[in-house]
Amino acid sequence: MRTVPVWWSSPMSSPSQTHSEAPSTGRGAPFGPLRGIKVLDLTRLPPGGHCTVALADLGADVIRLESPGAAGQPSLVVGQVGLSRGKRSATLNLRHARGTEVLTRLAGSVDVLVENNAPGELEGRGFGYPQAAERFPRLIWCSVTGFGQEGPYADRAGHDLTYTAHSGLLTALSPDLPWHPRAMLAVPLGAMAATSGILAALYERATTGRGCQIDVSLADAATWVAGALDAPFRDEAGGVPFSPDRRLYQCGDGEWITVAAAEPRTWQALCDGIGAPELAADGVPGPDRHEAVTAQLSSIFSTRTASDWVDALGPLGAAVGAVNTGRRIAADPHNATRGTTTEVAGVTVAANPIRLRDGNGDRSTTATEEPPVVGQHTDAVLREAGYTADEIGELRADGVV
């Protein structure tokens, strides 16, 4: 059996490089498995923001590389505090003649580089993955794009709707076009795929000593989710059908609840809980009973508030839940207990869904430091990459950073 080294304390991009530990962010997390891992974030859009904030929550030192023209402004990923917390910010003008030179040196001081440029764009500027792999074989390079690094659509532009529709997930959710979801779907799915890929690559590097490129396509990630449905790749109806035991019902206060009592046990619990045990006599209703049973349940649920029904039926195992929106998401007692959301700079944001706990009961935490201002950590980041004070002053005078 081979021994796996502790990869988060391993040397950085090459044995010849010097490495200083990532500075403390002050978050005081008792359990941060990625402490000592440094991430250079070149992304500007939500997929990269979702990915790198997840890494920051796990203890990584994430450095956003931004345009000097925005120096002094809040460092926000498309204005979202939730995607920008717990990170540092440094500036670099990648279009400057010396921009690639500085980027190369910064890349040599980190473990992971995350970017969302068009395929080949950074390579064309003189420092893409091929150049990085040759110079820093331990560097892990994560590319997050809409359609991936290869294929006839690789260079095409798009947004979340583009990739959700292309993937088959849009029509898997509802074939009744035209419609589209109000929330992004492909973006967070792709971001979590990127996070998983980075963690796998870090483990692989620990065993082989070599990094790699991670090629994440948002469209591929959404197709992976669509693939969990019945017959997703055949032209026939599939998915979860509408039936009395699996649908939404409006309650007496106008709010909605979900019913997902699709098994004999949960259906029996539901029928007993609402005072209509006779509905369970013949088991879960078949298609011939759908209309009548739906009408009867609708009438019963209209007699009490949504919260009353959830509180009464949930503990019985009836598979009934609330339809939360807006402030009710954070206020939900279960979410409040688990810390599903948290406060950052006075804004309610989603907490990291990855929860780790060790044998001592220490837990990972969500980074709650408010986003920095653009360029706040430029000098520190350059010093960590080996630049002297005079060199940093020269870079500033020349408009490189």
Image: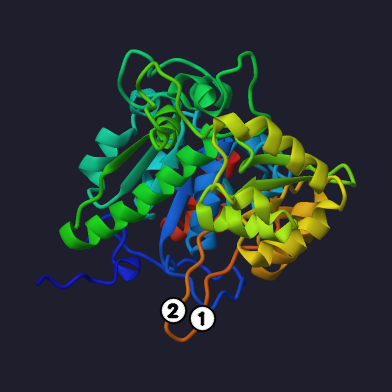
Q: Nearer the viewer, residue 59 or 289?
A: 289
Residue 44, image x and y in percent?
57, 35
Residue at 46% across, 19% down: 166
Residue 125, image x and y in percent?
38, 26
Q: Nearer the viewer, residue 335 or 2?
A: 335
Report the residue marked by disc 2. 358
Query: In terms of image quadrants, where is residue 271?
Result: bottom right
Give the Cα separation between the discs numbered 2 and 1: 6 Å
Report the residue marked by disc 1. 362
Q: Are marks 2 and 1 in contact (CB under 8 Å)?
A: yes
Number of disc labels: 2
Q: How many other residues sit within 10 Å of disc 2, few (<14), some (14-19) or many (≥20)?
A: few
In the depicted structure, whether residue 66 falls above or below residue 315: above
The colour scheme of the drawn protein is rainbow
- Residue 376 can be seen, yes or no: no
Residue at 33% across, 27% down: 123
Q: Is residue 206 left or right of residue 156?
A: left
